[in-house]
Amino acid sequence: MPPRRPERTRAYPLPMAAPLSVAAAQARILGALTPLRSERVPLAEALGRVLAAPVVSRRTLPPFANSAMDGYAVLAADIAGATGEHPAVLPVRGESRAGAVPAHGLEPGTAMRIMTGAPLPEGADTVVRHEDTDDGRATVAVRVAAPHGTSVRLAGEDMRAGDEVLTAGRRLRSGDLAACAALGEVWLEVGRRPRVAVLSTGDELVEPEREPGPGQIVDSNAVSVSAAVREAGGDPVRLGIARDTVDDLRRHLEEGARCDLVVTSAGVSVGDHDHVRDVVEEMGSLDLWRVAMRPGRPLAVGSVRGVPFIGLPGNPVSSQVTFELFARPAILALQGASQPHRPRSVARTLEPMDKPEGLETFHRGILERDADGGPPGVRLTGAQGSGILRSMVLADCLVALPAAGSRVPEGTLVEIIPLG
């Protein structure tokens, strides 16, 4: 008889406590993280970075009162009774153009031609659009009684010196960079981009450029995780594929421990060839959880050589959904983001949605605009299995269904998490 295979022993007990909620798991992950140090970067490289220090205005914007329209600078009192039938006719005295200060102020009872963005001449308080005049040069017939302040941008109406324009922890968008440029902030203090080790595990996996043989599958998880790391502001470090041996997994994780975060996929179950949990505990610490959710119930969290570790499930949809809910916020938190989670909104279900009782469920959904201006509608992408990659391809949101209940009727307001 062949020798009996020894039973596997583990240095930790299998989890028997009640599964955590998604929110509780998220809080535990973020609570264990410390933001990385900050660095100064030029404005041109700051898109998507997280501010480590507030941006405080050193300037007044606009720096001077100026025109919001091409037209004529006037005194509102001089055109108070103007109509199409009885226009106010004023002599035109000079011009104010962008980039130059008018040669003189505006005298009462006169008008001055003015261009968009040009300084408002001293004495003027209103701008009349070209369209509301006869566009005269020597004299102008004003056909409307424009109220005081019409089409005038006041000095400082946007920002004043000392205003806190952008707060620390904000992830910078293109409009934020425009404000920084206007204020002369050409260098910004931002959180360092975390280097994120990305590791797939499994003897069955092959790289995307290889044609899979019998029993093999392409490693799509490393591609999706690396892209998601980059979208979250991190720098992915691809470690390749670890085979289902303790030695190979240990070698890969040693390399990953040089980064700021290690994210793996697969190998966190209890099969004979699932070694991730054993090796992680050997090299650091392991906090293994069952999260009351679908897809993606098993989640391994801990540290490797002192570096934070998140072990995702192996099924591709489970991997992408759990990355979105747990790893993406962690990457943003390492950069110092004050709001690491995507903001949720609501939509109305356009079809019934079934789910397991007791599990928070994250269906993949497609939003449809409501013709009456109400909340958008949401329908499923089709089959919702954890191996259906097409469900993620078609989705523009995750439909977050609560743990209680097993069926959500059509027309129910539900939470959604936008994707992309």
Image: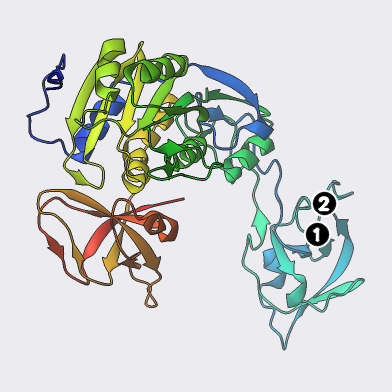
In-front residue for pair 125/12: 12
Q: Is residue 90 left or right of residue 317?
A: right
Are there few (<14), some (14-19), or many (20+) residues within 10 Å of tag 2? some
Q: Secondary structure at mark 1?
A: loop
Which of disc 2 and disc 1 is earlier in sequence? 2
Q: Nearer the viewer, residue 54 or 70?
A: 54
Q: Is residue 157 left or right of residue 88?
A: left
- Seen in the picture, residue 317 relative to 164 is either above or below; the reply is below
Of 339 and 204, the residue lying toward us: 204
Number of other residues with Cα within 10 Å of mark 1, as a class: few under 14, some 14 to 19, many 20 or more:
many
Q: Which residue is mark 2?
A: 98
x and y percentages locating residue 395 in the rendered image: 40, 59
Q: Do we see residue 339 in this rendering?
A: no
Q: Residue 193: percent from the left, percent from the top?
A: 52, 25
Q: Nearer the viewer, residue 337 or 250?
A: 250
Residue 386 in the image: state x and y as whole percent: 29, 51
Residue type at tag 2: Ala
Q: Distance between the Cα atoms at labels 1 and 2?
A: 6 Å
Tell me which amino acid carries mark 1: Met
Q: Quadrant of residue 148?
A: bottom right
Quadrant of the image for the N terminus?
Answer: top left
Residue that numbered label 1 is attached to: 115
Task: Reply above or below: 10 against 21.
Answer: above
Residue at 38%, 37% (x, y): give it: 204
Q: Is residue 405 above or below residue 167?
A: below
Whether label 1 touches label 2, CB < 8 Å? yes
